[in-house]
Image (cartoon, rainbow, N blue to C red):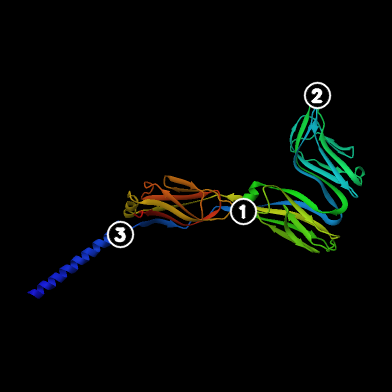
Amino acid sequence: MENEFAVILVAGLAVFGLFWVASQSYNFNNQATSQLTLYEKDFGQIGQASQDIRTVNFGSFSVGEGRGDVQAYREEKATLRNKLLGGQKITIKYDATAPKTGHIEFEVLGKDGNGAVYVKVNGKTIFNEKLVTTGTPSINISADVLKPGMNKIVIGTRQGGLFSSTEYVIEDIEVTVNDRKFNDYQKSFRVYQYEIEEFAAANLTFTLPVDSSTRTAPLKVFVNNEKVFSQKISRSTQSISLDRNQINVGYNTVRFETEGNARYALENTDLTLRYFGTIKPGTATASFNLNKTSLSFAQREKTNEYINFNYVNLMPSTNPVQITLNQYSKTITPDSFSVIRIPEETLEEQNEITVSSNGSYIIRNLNVLSQRPEK
């Protein structure tokens, strides 16, 4: 009888133990779980960007001892003004060795009045015309008005009438003289804001023809006073890579120089800027359902809901990304890993999530989570 009671007692304890384990398993799944992944997806690449190219041509020129185009004057912006009492003009003095010809170019930004723009070289008027806004005159200086020694070049404007005044605002003013001397070559070029923001690459290229160089000293190239090239070279084509920190928004300078009796004749000198200029915005949408258990977990007051994802940008600049889940929408500037907290009433049994941006990027490991904060 005692043995039968012992067997019954052991069996009872075993059944009780099974019920206890089952209840503990139930409590773990429904009470102690701290995080539940409701949805996950790799969206992949969204949006496409292609490169645009702009080329600045510097042409052909020589550096060192010999004949070449020497920059006599360079200014980003100036005002030409002629009033009844006083005015404003550009006066350039250039000390020439054996000048042949010269050249003046600029762009008209604005105009007020009816007077003409004139150019005088050593007292002789070589240009006198009324210009229009956005006009880009190209003015040649003939050899007969230039002389060895000091030359005076004046750019100004005339009154439109006896009592009227005239004003021109001009930019990108450059005066060059073809002269024989030991000369460096310097040129300015403009870089625009979008070319820096979406910068991809920049290359400065030039060609040295056969027997064009006297290689007793290196050819040196500077961009914004930073040395980017220094070599003794003969017949070849060179390509110098520039990064975005070596050029600036606005005006930049490139300078070629050498020393002693060295001489280099360069042809086909170009600066090619590559930037992401054409963007095809992208949008990706996905749907997912939640069962009653998952939805019940997410709708508890003691849980927080999140969307997180890994973000890989395919462009130099980061464009905002808009995440829309059902009726809730959030626009952020993402990092490599981004987290968005969503209101608890956002999730439903049937859900739709949309990712969109004006950029080009990759979205990986997007998760919708419900999490119970740790106490």
- Reading the image, the residue beneath label 2 is 163
Q: Disc 1 marks which amino acid?
A: Ser
Mark 1 burial class by Cα count in 10 Å: few <14, some 14-19, many 20+: few
**Distance between the alpha carbons at the discs numbered 3 and 2:** 94 Å
- Reading the image, the residue beneath label 1 is 50
Element carrying mark 3: helix
- Reading the image, the residue beneath label 3 is 29
The reply to whether residue 189 is in sight is yes
Residue 285, how many percent across, how many down?
A: 47, 51
Q: Earlier in the sequence, mark 3 or mark 2?
A: 3
Name the residue furthest top. Answer: 163
- In the picture, measured across the screen, residue 183 lies left or right of residue 302, that is right
Name the residue furthest bottom. Answer: 3
Q: Earlier in the sequence, mark 2 or mark 1?
A: 1
* Image quarter hosting the N terminus: bottom left
- In the picture, measured across the screen, residue 177 lies left or right of residue 306, that is right
Which one is in front, 260 or 357? 260
* Residue 274 against residue 25 in the figure, above or below: above
Residue 152, how many percent across, how many down?
A: 87, 41
**Residue displayed at 78% across by 32% down:** 81
Q: Disc 3 marks which amino acid?
A: Asn
Q: Earlier in the sequence, mark 1 or mark 3?
A: 3
Instruction: Name the mark nearer the viewer: 3 or 2.
Output: 2
